[in-house]
Image: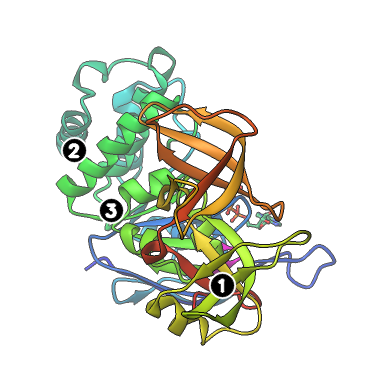
Amino acid sequence: MSSVTIDKLDKTYSPGKKDSFRAVKGIDLEIHDKEFMVLVGPSGCGKSTTLRMIAGLEEITGGTLKIGDRIVNDVAPKDRGIAMVFQNYALYPHMTVFDNMAFGLKLQRMPREEIKRRVDNAADILGLESMLDRKPKALSGGQRQRVAVGRAIVRQPEVFLFDEPLSNLDAKMRVQMRTEISKLHARLDATMIYVTHDQVEAMTMGDRICVMKDGNIMQVDGPLNLYNKPQNMFVAGFIGSPPMNFFKGQVVDGDGGKKFVETPASGKGFELLLDNRLASSAQKGGKEIVFGIRPEDIETVSATDAEGIEAIIDVAEPMGAETFLYLTTPGGHNFIGKVQADHSFSLGEKIHVRFDLARCHLFDAETENVL
Ligand code: ATP
């Protein structure tokens, strides 16, 4: 049983001092047994602090931390049943791969045969069998990272913790190691908590993802739900690339039903007739609302299309199958469309685009929560 339960967990660095800083603000999070949970968010959001509190490397200021049924707030890191893989691998340069992996077990005075069995097993899982006698400097970045993971595996922990383990690798190796860690999760059937600032890593690896901002949790959900049903503008803007476009405006009664009227800082905004779903959502909001549409839910249409919105092309980036269009509305609002690359676009060209209303989101402009 290796669930991790976080209850009102709080961290203030240097409490009571002039430079005190509250990095984690009373968060609640339940990580299920055998789950792969990703903590993701921009730099400084508190994800590493949270992981380090779970590891016991950072003192907890408030709240309760349970691993399985045991409260571990005051349990030493080595007795928590966890193993952590760090960003910088933290390998001993003068030791062989075998000794690096065996080091923690030797400290525990484990019998030599058992150490050998565990290291050989980890080397087999990670494809390191032929490298056990090498020193870290004779390994590639990806291989070093595998040794760091191996060192965690041999401890047979209840919970694996990963702190941005792939950030020192080049893009290709990152993609490869991403798949390897996911396979490892399936093979070891262990609980894993993984910190990253990379939303692609989060989306591809996590059973569930916890999105953090400023020491708070913004949403905890499966990857598809985060993408399709973001609970607030922060998550909507953080998950997806290029990010979701937002337009501020008001909902008014018009011919044929409720309309969203964009209210740009200057100039005239566009108008959109809302369908029933959006009209009823809009009623829950205040005076100002925000209309959100992802670049991939925008298509180009002919000038005569009744639902078309006028836009000027600032930049067109052909990406192969699709083209990214950097566009400006007549009201001067910039947004991005990801459209089929079935014809070429010119700079300054006036085009018309249609938003897929079934896939758009409305938010309250004040609370920034979804309506
Ligand atoms: P990153 O991706 O940059 O590592 P993060 O989300 O993991 O960011 P944390 O490392 O958890 O963020 O830090 C959260 C906040 O706490 C940051 O604003 C950071 O400056 C602050 N912080 C971290 N460690 C300390 C410390 N020892 N003393 C004071 N403040 C700290």
What's the residue at 35%, 42% (across, down)? 107
Disc 3 is placed on an element classified as loop
N-terminal-most mark, 3 or 1 = 3
Local packing at callout 2 (Cα closer than 10 Å; few below 14, some 14-19, many 20+) is many
Would residue 136 be seen by someone viewing this image from the given angle? yes
Part of the protein shown in magenta = 213-217
Q: Main secondary structure of the magenta part?
A: strand
In the picture shown, does residue 339 fall above or below 359? above
Q: Residue 252 appears in which quarter of the rendering?
A: bottom right
Disc 2 is placed on an element classified as helix
Q: Nearer the viewer, mark 3 or mark 1?
A: 1
Residue 124 place in picture, x, y as percent: 16, 29
Q: Whole-Å distance between the Cαs marked 2 and 3?
A: 12 Å
The answer to whether residue 185 is left or right of residue 5 is left
The type of residue carrying mark 3 is Pro
In the picture shown, does residue 201 fall above or below 358? above
What's the residue at 58%, 62% (across, down)? 213
The type of residue carrying mark 2 is Arg
The type of residue carrying mark 1 is Phe
What's the residue at 52%, 62% (across, down)? 292
Q: Whole-Å distance between the Cαs marked 1 and 2?
A: 62 Å
The answer to whether residue 335 is left or right of residue 275 is right
